[in-house]
Amino acid sequence: EVHLVESGGNLVQPGGSLRLSCAASGFMFNVYGMTWVRQAPGKGLEWVSYIDSGSTIIYYADSVRGRFTISRDNAKNSLYLQMNTLRGEDTAVYYCARVMGSFLTNIFDYWGQGALVTVSS
Amino acid sequence: QSALTQPASVSGSPGQSITISCNGTSSDVGAYNYVSWYQQHPGKAPKVMIFEVSNRPSGVSNRFSGSKSGNTASLTISGLQAEDEADYYCSSYTGNSAPYVFGTGTKVTVL
């Protein structure tokens, strides 16, 4: 059974940094692209970042480009999101999700339970 | 990249059919057949209900169907049931450096 478990969510001050992790199990992690999607409290879904299976194709939303870095360690079946220069508007639940097929397909078929990041002084 | 436009809310009685629209542009919804729909119950992670405009993942009820015309995609739920009450989001591939965009979300209420 596919499982994705996020960790690392926390309260952080504006301008601070945080690293989220997503532990994957139940599937061949090294053949799937992965993505991060966030949801601010009471708001809709916002796509954040994508990384392909070999870390050669990486994309970011305009709102986080230059501040966030996505990475993965296939040996550890883990996905990461390094978040720097955090702002209040980054406050959200962050979900990791598996991407089925190529990055074109836009199919996020399995999701984690989410990690809450709160940016506040 | 602006969010795709969905109605804020749609409601229907049990057994009825409802349709949720997802308005994009000729650069996203209109350009590619890579439109997905997600269902999200309160406090839960989203679940994919439709992919590539009209395909259902294994295990998703055939009461859910998708279509597209021009720059607008649609999700239809037939035989509405209480368990269908949730938020629904469309999503499209955009073909640019930020390749995915979600819709604004629609709250479905079963009366």
Image: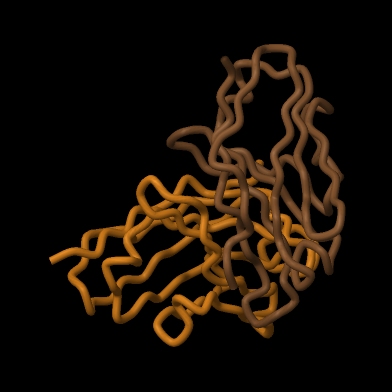
Chain colours: A orange, B brown
Q: Residue at x 18, y 64 (%)?
A: A120
Quadrant occupied by the C terminus of chain A: bottom left
Give the total number of marks visible in the rendering: 0
Q: Quadrant of residue B93?
A: bottom right
Q: Nearer the viewer, residue B67 or B59?
A: B67
Placement of A8 over or under B59, stated as above or below: below
Foreground of the two, A44 or A105: A44
| B101 with respect to B62 (left or right) | left
Residue A26 percent coordinates (x, y)? 65, 49
Residue A57 in picture, x, y percent from top left: 68, 82
| Residue at the left extreme, as displayed | A121
Residue B54 lies, with reference to residue B95, above or below; the image says above
In percent of width and height, residue A17 lies at 28, 76
Q: Residue at x 66, y 41 (%)?
A: A1
Q: Taking A43 as reference, is B99 above or below it?
A: below
Q: Is residue A54 left or right of residue A38?
A: right
| Quadrant of res B8 | top right
- A65 on left or right of B38: left
Residue at the (63%, 58%) spot, across then down: B4
- Quarter of the image holding residue B81? top right
Relative depth, front residue between A25 and B12: B12
